[in-house]
Image (cartoon, rainbow, N blue to C red):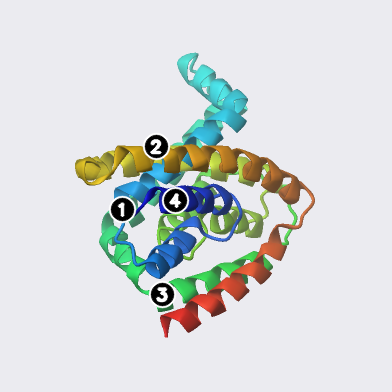
Amino acid sequence: MNLIQAVFLGLVQGLTEWFPVSSSGHLALFQNLFGLDVPVLFDILLHVGTLIVVLLVFYKDIYKILKSIFTWNTKSEYFKLAVFIVIGSIGTVIIGYFFRNLFVGFFNNLKIVGIAFLATGCLLFFSNKEGNKKLNCKDSFLIGLVQGIALIPGISRSGSTISTGMLFGIERKKVARFSFLLLIPAVIGGFIFEFKDIASINPVYALVGVLTSVIVGFFSLRFLLKIIEKGKFRYFGYYCFLIGVITLILGF
């Protein structure tokens, strides 16, 4: 991998992590096209860049969550949100622990990536349900399981978690906030798990990739939040179908 490719992968991550089109699927696609054998840790470092974006955009919510925990205000909406994030993270850990090696192996199989893109497109088309249901423990756990399944390249993490919440009848803005905050423990856990491979990463390329991911991701997340408010989330399904067909053709 050279510097230009590192910048390009950071750009891809920054755009596609927030848009419901699967950042891991796009990274797998372009890494295969470039003939790159990129360590899993590099992809996780790019996700650290998008994690920084979450901290920048949702800093008020994060502050209120931490405050409710330290004051042990169990009746606070944000304390309950913290509990839901923990429960959702347990679901993610279960899937990640048992299926991580299998899912990582899919990065080199464009046929599976293409099918996963098509599956994301189908899920997005069914996500037009508007509701006002409140988040609960069961839904949080199930959304966490879905986030774990989104380790499969081509399955959009944001698309699948937000769509699942909307299918449960949860309000769009609330499930979107939950989805983005649920990313925080997932990325931190993945980074700790893969940190043993840090010596395989070029620090300059990693830094450039992460910075690119942060800059691009900040603007793409703000844009996506506006799209979710307007109820046009499902239109990304058309793109997923298109990129899925292209990926399948390349895979065959």
Residue displayed at 58% across by 26% down: 59
Q: Which of marks 4 and 1 is nearer the N terminus?
A: 4
Q: Where is mark 1, residue-wise?
A: 40
Q: How many marks?
A: 4
Q: In which quarter of the image is residue 37?
A: bottom left
Residue 54, given in percent of the width and then of the height, sits at: 54, 35
C-alpha distance separating marks 1 and 2 = 15 Å
Q: Where is mark 3, residue-wise?
A: 110
C-alpha distance separating marks 4 and 1 = 19 Å
C-alpha distance separating marks 3 and 4 = 23 Å
Numbered tag placed on residue 207 in the rendering: 2
* 48 relative position to 78: left or right: left
For badge 3, the amino acid type reads: Leu
Residue displayed at 56% across by 67% down: 120
Considering the numbered disc 1 on the image, is that residue within a helix, a strand or a loop?
helix
Q: Which of marks 1 and 2 is nearer the N terminus?
A: 1
Q: Can residue 133 be seen in this view?
A: no
Is disc 1 surrounded by few (<14), some (14 to 19) or many (20+) residues within 10 Å? some
Q: Which of marks 3 and 1 is nearer the N terminus?
A: 1
For badge 4, the amino acid type reads: Ile
Considering the numbered disc 4 on the image, is that residue within a helix, a strand or a loop?
helix
Residue 206, given in percent of the width and then of the height, sits at: 36, 41
